[in-house]
Image (cartoon, rainbow, N blue to C red):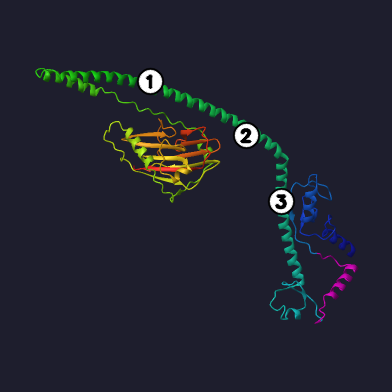
Amino acid sequence: MASAITQCSTSELTCSICTDYLTDPVTICCGHRFCNPCLCLLWEDALTPNCCPVCKEISQQMYFKRIIFAEKQAIPTGESVSCQLSSSAMLICGRHQEIKNLICETDRSLLCFLCSQSPRHANHKHFMTKEADEYYRNKLLIQMKSIWKKKQKNQRNLNRETNIIRTWKVFIHLRSMMISAEYPKVCQYLREEEQKHLEGLAREGRIVFEQLKISQTRMAKMSVLLRGMFEKLKEMSCKADVNLPQDLGDIMKRNEFLRLAMPQPVNPQLSAWTITGMSERLNFFRVYITMDHKICSNHKLLFEDLRHLQCSLDDTDMSCTPTSTQYTSSWGAQILTSGKHYWEVDVKDSCNWVIGLCREAWTKRNDMRLDSEGIFLLLCLKVDDHFSLLSTSPLLPHYIPRPQGWLGVFLDYECGIVSFVNVAQSSLICSFLSCIFYFPLRPFICHGSK
């Protein structure tokens, strides 16, 4: 009877997977018990659905019903009694001949009661051996559970990475096809935009040209009338004084009529068309220009040219003098000899300015003029309420709106291109094309009084 009870108790406390006493036992759907770690490892490696290792019944869940931890205590047999006796002999303190029934938490050594009170261990925490076994076994189980959770998380990540690797090349190929399909759309859109831009420019050009022709015809007719009136007044000045009051009255009426009918000159101005992607493209080459205040060249001839040019644009003010506007210049500290460079200048607080690039040699000379070689400048001059944009080399007017905020300057040294951009509108103001740069260039800024 005792042997049967012993076999029954032992079988209930034994895991059929590892054939050892149950560790962190769980009960699955069919009622069989196993070590939780053993079952997890077995089911993780299995290629078939999870099933009981004993009865082969399929279990759908990996979360099990836990049972109370079974201590490794069975009814002692003769062999187990002899093992216990031999182990008890090893637990006798050789110094005090006392049983080592305490464990030091600090160094995990077995101690008798007297050893635990020694100076070496007196301040340490101690456990009874039975309690210590349970304590450390629980800590071990907690660590096992923590590691197993990490292992499961790592497995999920591994499965995810495996799935990504399996489909990655297909995804890259598909993504390449998608991107390749978009670029022709962009090119087509830019071609359509270019066509609209050119058509709009041609349409505006025709309209302005017709306005100029009409204005020219009116001014030519007015010129004939004014010449006739002038000749009439000349004749009157030679007549007798008897008819002068009456004739002068008629002439004054005609003069007033001609004054009211005097045609005004056309101020041609084209629209600033936005060029899609231009600002983004130029910003790839952005640099930050600093001004070199040590360069104090006083370009008197250049400033004189600017003042004379400003006066020549003023057709209404015959008393304009070359000293009407004061200018000050500054040079960039950077010397540009290759590559692509883009920078921006704030011009909102200035009505008269000159911005661009000049040959570096001009920093040491004072004879630079608007028609000098090696200068690539954009000018903005104000006369009354009208602003004029001009570029140098040669001096050329540009009939588009002036930038009222930031002005962008782009240099492509190898291709020989200097461009000026209205940053707010993302539109082109003008470009110097097909230049040949065989000399260093410096940024140049010249501001006039507001």
Judged left or right of residue 186, residue 59 is right
Where does the magenta region start and end?
72-96
Q: Residue 264's spot in the image, x, y percent?
A: 30, 25
Q: In the rendered view, tell whether residue 96 sits above or below residue 399.
A: below
Q: Which structural element holds mark 1? A: helix
Q: Cα distance, mark 2 to mark 3?
A: 34 Å
Q: Say whether residue 142 is left or right of residue 430.
A: right
Q: Residue at x 90, y 68 (%)?
A: 79
Q: Are marks 2 and 1 in contact (CB under 8 Å)?
A: no
* Near-viewer residue (301 or 141): 301
- CA distance for labels 2 and 1: 46 Å
Q: Is 351 situated above or below 96?
A: above
Of callouts 1 and 3, the N-terminal one: 3
Residue 179, which numbered label? 2
- Pick the residue in front: 116 or 51: 116
Compare marks 2 and 3 and give the one earlier in the sequence.
Answer: 3
Q: Which residue is denoted by mark 1 in the rendering?
A: 210
